[in-house]
Amino acid sequence: MRIAIIGASGGTGIQVVERATARGHDVTAVVRTPAKLDRLTSAPIEIAQADVTDRASLVFALRGCDAVVFSVGPESARQPTSLRELGIRNTIEAAREAGVPRILAVSASGITTAGDDPFTRLVLKPIVQRVLREPFRDLRAAEDVLTASDADWTIVRPPRLTDKPRTGHYRSRAVKNVTGGLSIARGDLADAVVDLLEDPQSIRSIVSVAS
């Protein structure tokens, strides 16, 4: 496939670039600042400059692609934001115009307690959800927009992301969170993203992953 990765210069995005190219896929890295990406990877990729708040720039970047990965981080952990809700809406419209049917969005397992063990559900998650109230609200809204669309969508929900070395292993669970899964290395999340893109059974599915 040719995969467009929106947010390719972010901590997760750059790992998806590396894993997708290692698996033989062609990659279009969609970033606001191309020079930043040049310093992060030597992978053989195309770079397209675009902004998720600018639908027209996304249409240009997505043409010729088979799938899109939406991996955009929050603007702030404390301030109200709708960046990802707006970004996914623009991505859906741009993908439709560019003829790209497949969209995978990286969300977060923190937005739900379904599947969590009692300690996580009753002690940890209330604290995390209170601290990250605004980013999680934005993610829930983005998920609602995507799941209501006619795209061939997949949502992947990781827990806390770490910069530990990739292990090549991860656990996954449909709809509910991975019980006891409190973190995942970004490299392992990237493996999960590419695995899901390659699996047609994951279309219109929400999948949680964890180490």
Image (cartoon, helix red, strand yellow):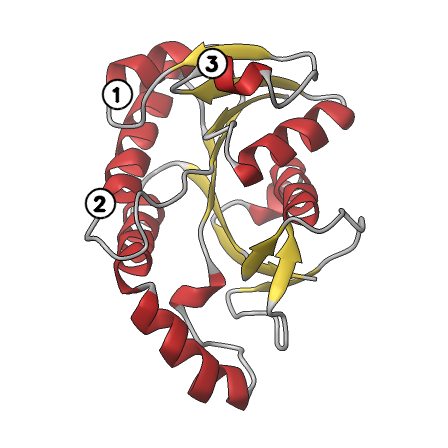
* Residue designated by label 3: 34
Q: How many marks?
A: 3
* Residue designated by label 2: 82
Q: Residue 93's quadrant in the figure?
A: top left
Q: Which mark is residue 55?
A: 1
The Cα atoms of the two marked residues, 3 and 2, are separated by 24 Å
Where is residue 130? Give x, y as percent: 30, 72
Pointer 3 or 1: first along the chain: 3
Q: Which mark is residue 138?
A: none
Q: Residues within 10 Å of mark 2 (few under 14, many from 20)?
A: some
Q: Amino acid at mark 3?
A: Pro
The Cα atoms of the two marked residues, 2 and 1, are separated by 15 Å
Q: Residue 43's quadrant in the figure?
A: top right
Q: Amino acid at mark 1?
A: Arg
Residue drawn at (41%, 38%), measured in percent from left and top? Answer: 72
| Mark 2 and mark 1 residues within 8 Å of each other at the beta carbon | no
The Cα atoms of the two marked residues, 3 and 1, are separated by 18 Å
In the image, which is nearer the foreground, mark 2 or mark 1? Answer: 2
Q: Amino acid at mark 2?
A: Ser
Q: In the shown orientation, is residue 141 left or right of residue 11?
A: left
Q: Residues within 10 Å of mark 1 (few under 14, many from 20)?
A: many
Residue drawn at (47%, 80%), measured in percent from left and top? Answer: 124
Quarter of the image that includes the C terminus? bottom right
In the image, which is nearer the foreground, mark 3 or mark 1? Answer: 3
Q: Residues within 10 Å of mark 3 (few under 14, many from 20)?
A: some
In the image, which is nearer the foreground, mark 3 or mark 2? Answer: 3
Q: In the shown orientation, is residue 50 left or right of residue 168?
A: left
Pointer 3 or 2: first along the chain: 3
Task: Indicate the secondary structure of the residue bearing disc 1.
Answer: helix
